Amino acid sequence: MRDEEGSATVWVVALAGLLAALGAVTVLVGSAVVARHRATTAADLTALAVAGRAVLADPAACAVGEGVAAANGAGLTACRVDAGAVVVVEVTVPVRLGPLGVTAARAHARAGPVPP
């Protein structure tokens, strides 16, 4: 059995590397999921704020949405006020994925008054 000496060290190092890689992937996926939730929340809040101004026929309703999106760490990429003050917005939230770089999580939301 003398020719097997030290092989456990190789297996432990390989397993430690595998666990480290799995941990890194878990952190990156978790960051992406959190960014997606942040984008969805920012889109919902932005749509509600814009719809609140659109109901009052405010021509600068989308400008209000830009401020709300920025306060939530997002950027407003699209804002549309349709007939009946129904609002559709799209926001992006930057997400840093370590060595993969920075990408954007996108979300859109719709809000407006409920018809009688």
Image (tube, helix red, strand yellow):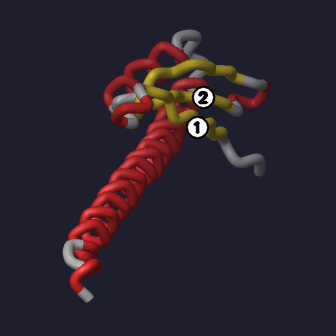
Q: Name the residue that disc number 2 marks.
A: 90
Label 2 sits on a secondary structure element that is strand
Q: Is residue 64 left or right of residue 88?
A: left
* Of residues 114 and 24, the one drawn nearer to the viewer in this rendering: 24
Q: Is residue 78 left or right of residue 93?
A: right
Q: Which mark is residue 107?
A: 1
Which corner quadrant of the image does residue 99 belong to?
top left
Q: Position of residue 9 (x, y in %)?
A: 21, 70
* Of residues 23 and 19, the one drawn nearer to the viewer in this rendering: 19
Label 2 and label 1: CA atoms lie apart by 6 Å
Q: Is residue 15 left or right of residue 94?
A: left
Vertical side of 73 occupied by 16: above or below: below
The answer to whether residue 29 shows anywhere in this view is: yes
Query: What's the amino acid at mark 2?
Result: Glu
Vertical side of 111 occupied by 29: above or below: below
* Quarter of the figure with the N terminus: bottom left
Q: Earlier in the sequence, mark 2 or mark 1?
A: 2
In the displayed orientation, state which residue is furthest to the top. Answer: 59
- Bin the neighbour count of mark 1 within 10 Å (Cα to Cα): few under 14, some 14-19, many 20 and up: many
Circles 2 and 1, Cβ within 8 Å, touching? The answer is yes
Q: Position of residue 30 (x, y in %)?
A: 40, 54
Q: Position of residue 40 (x, y in %)?
A: 52, 44
Q: Residue at x 49, y 45 (%)?
A: 36
